[in-house]
Amino acid sequence: MERLTAEMRALLVFAAVGRNALPNTIPISTADRERKDYNMSAQADRLGVLIAPVLAELELSLYDLDYSGGNLRVLLDRPGGIDLGAITQATRRISNLLDEADIISSAYTLEVSSPGLERNLRTPVHFASAIGREVKIKTRPSVEGERRVDGTLIAADETTCEVRFEDGSSRVLQLSDIERAKTHFVGDAAPKPGKGSRPGRPANKSSATSKKASTTGKKPSKTQPAGEEG
């Protein structure tokens, strides 16, 4: 009864917050859902609904959520970026809520982090937020034309996106035809090796932007957030 009460309370609060607290979904077939290319599992959706009130209270948005192989990965975002302090606070709140609701029966690892500079694009909201940025897209094998589509994302809606190439031409893609997509960071120059940076990767300017800030907790045994000691 306690578990049911916790879930019902979270759902009621979520109803007041509104469904825009969760990423929109891409209209794809049942077969594609089973492949989990777009993290559409029922359990992931249920977990997203459960933690939505906590995120709203912390003024954070859920960028993506994936639950597979005993790992629950939650990607959070906030206008202007998110720092390690916010990640740590969110991890504790989410971990406590999951323990109270007890909707994951088996042992699992919880990882909460920011999407980073180069982030996966899975939903219409993701694509809309990336307009004006460089993207790398790969279409499904069944789609006609070149499978790799790299360029500047200039438009996106609930079902399509448009990418402009260097020669000025553009291509419109159905979101359901996309196998995977991500933003591509283009810097003035490649960072020099050393001090935590990797060749060909964005330099680490802060834990909230260039480098993914993350902290991990486990069930049933709890661990402290990364960077903290007892």
Image (cartoon, grey):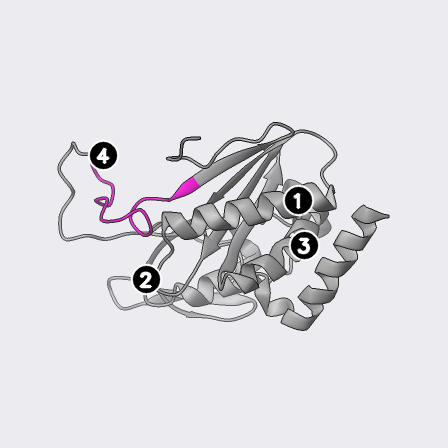
Distance from disc 3 to disc 4, alpha carbons, whole Å, reads: 36 Å
Q: Where residue 200 appears, x then y in whole percent? A: 22, 39
Viewer-nearest of discs 2 and 3? 3
Residue located at (38% from left, 55% from top): 82
Label 2: which secondary element: loop
Q: Earlier in the sequence, mark 3 or mark 4?
A: 3
Instruction: Give neighbour class at mark 1: few <14, some 14-19, many 20+ (Cα, 10 Å).
Output: many
Label 1: which secondary element: helix
Residue located at (48% from left, 34% from top): 224
Instruction: Give neighbour class at mark 2: few <14, some 14-19, many 20+ (Cα, 10 Å).
Output: some
Which residue corresponds to mark 1? 98
- Asked if marks 2 and 4 touch (Cβ < 8 Å), the reply is no
Q: Where residue 124 appears, x then y in whole percent? A: 53, 64
84 w.r.t. 17: above or below = above
Instruction: Give neighbour class at mark 4: few <14, some 14-19, many 20+ (Cα, 10 Å).
Output: few
What segment is highlighted magenta in the picture? Answer: 196-214
Q: Amino acid at mark 3?
A: Leu
Which residue corresponds to mark 4? 196
Residue 185 inside the magenta-drawn segment = no
Q: Amino acid at mark 1?
A: Leu
Q: Amino acid at mark 2?
A: Arg
On residue 133, which mark appears? 2
